[in-house]
Image: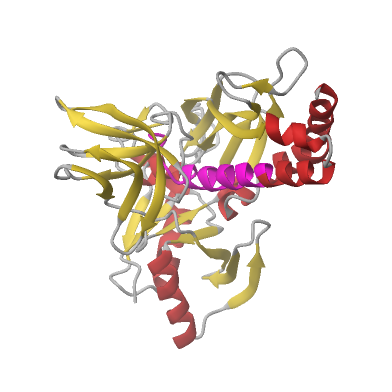
Amino acid sequence: MPQLLTKIEGILKDKYQPALANQINIEPSPFLEMIRKEPLTNNKVRLAAPVGLNGGFGFGAEGANTPAAAEQRYLSFELDAVDMYVDIQISNKTIALGSSNASAMINALDAEIQGSYAAAKWNLGRALFGDGSGILSYFDPVEGNSDVIPVEDASRFIEGLLVDMYLSLDDEYHLNEAKMRIVSVDHVANTVTLSRPVLAATRGFFTVQGSYNRELTGLGAIFGDGSTLYGVDKSTTPSIVPQTFSLGGSITDLGLYRGIRSAKKYRGAAIDLIMLGDEAFEAYQTFMDEHHTHLVDRHKFVGGATGYSILVGDQEVILVNESMVPSKEAWAVDTKSFLLQQTPWEFLSHQSSIFTLMSNTSVYRALLASYGNLICANPGGCVKFTDCTT
C-alpha cells in the first residue's frame, strides 16, 4: 500500500502538477490568458497607479523662471492575497484494488484529477468577474421548506457545486446552511435545486462553500457599485471609476468606437479586449451578418473560446463571448493594465507526503494551492457598455 501511494504521488508531481499549473493560469477565460502574471512575494498585492501627467512642464522665455516642479501623482492600491485550492481525492479502496489492476487505478486517478481541475477552472473563471464577495446570486424569501430556490441570476451556478446559504437577519447576513450540493440549475426559470430542503424565510444569497468575502477581487469590483476599490474611495477619486456608455438597444462598431476612443482620450487606456454577455454577443453576431464589419481575423484561445479580431476605429480589438458578464452588457479592458500576482501552484505536503488521510474517512486527499490576487493599474480606463441588444 505505501508503495502504491508513493507511486501515485510521483505521477501527480511529475505528470499532472506542471500541466495543471500551466492550464489553470490560462484556460479559465480569454481575459486570464491575455493579462500579465507575476510571482507574489508577500501576503499583499500592491501597485502604484499613476494619476494624470507629471506637472513639471511649462513654456517659458529667456531670463524668465523655469517651470516649478510638480512630481507625478500616484494612487496606492493594495489587496490581500486570497487562497486558491484544487482538491484531489482518492479512496483507500481504489489504491487497494490498484495492487492487482494498476491500469484501473490510474484511470480512476485521472478521472478524479480531471474532475477537480474542471471545478477549479469553472470557479476561477467565474471569480475573475466577481467583486471578491463570492456572492453567486441573491434570492427573495421562499414560503415553507423547499429544495427549489428562485434566484435573481442562475448563470453563476453549475450542477455539483457545494454552496453556503446566507439569510438576512437584523439588517445583516448570517450563514444559515452550509455545504449544500447543487443538484440542478434551470437557467430559463432562474431556479436552483438543492440537495436538501431549506427554510429561506428572508432575503438571502448563495456563495461557494466557505468562500464568502474570500474570493479574487475580480472585474466585478471595478464595474460594480461598490464604494471602494483597492482601498481607495471611488466617490473622492472618480478617475478610478470606469466610463459607462449605453448603446440604446443597438450594438454597432460606431457605438463601441465611441467608448474606446473616450477611454484612450481621457483615461490613457488602449482597449484590446471586449467581453460581451450572452445576449450582447448574439446581438453583435446579428450586426456582423447585416453590416460590413472590418474583421481582421478569428482569434482562438487556449481554453477553447473563439473571438473576433476586428478594427474599431484605428485599433485592433478582440471581441469574445463571456457568459460571466451580465447578459446585455459588454466590458472593455486594456489587458496590459492588469496584473495577476500569485505563488506557483504546488502541492501542500505533510511529513514529506502530499497525501493526508481525511478525518473519519478512508479517503486520501492531495491539495494543490496558490495564493494571490488580481489588480489593475488603470481601472478607470475600463469601459462598460449597457443595453447591448439588437
Give the answer, above or below, for where 106 lies relative to 368. below
Give the answer, above or below, for where 7 lies relative to 247. above
Q: Is residue 8 left or right of residue 238?
A: right
Image quadrant containing the N terminus:
top right
Quadrant of residue 93 within the rendered picture:
top right
Q: Is residue 86 left or right of residue 387?
A: right
Please tell me whether the stretch drawn in magenta is mainly helix, strand or loop: helix
Does residue 118 belong to the magenta stretch?
yes
Q: How many marks?
A: 0
Give coordinates of residue 60: x percent, y percent. Answer: 50, 38
Q: What's the residue at 61%, 35% (across, down)?
A: 86
Q: Is residue 358 left or right of residue 53?
A: right
Comparing 210 with 254, the one in front is 210
Image quadrant containing the C terminus:
bottom left
Q: How is the image coloured?
A: secondary structure
Give coordinates of residue 184: x percent, y percent. Answer: 39, 53
Q: Is residue 74 left or right of residue 201?
A: right
Give coordinates of residue 349: x percent, y percent. Answer: 71, 19
Comparing 163 with 42, the one in front is 163
Quadrant of residue 106 within the rendered picture:
top right
Does residue 227 belong to the magenta stretch?
no
Q: What's the residue at 40%, 75% (across, down)?
A: 283
Q: Is residue 345 visible?
A: no
Question: In the image, which residues are magenta?
Answer: 112-133
Quadrant of residue 290 within the rendered picture:
bottom left
The extreme top residue here reads 351
Give coordinates of residue 164: x percent, y percent. Answer: 36, 34
Q: Is residue 283 visible?
A: yes
Q: What's the residue at 26%, 38% (across, down)?
A: 198
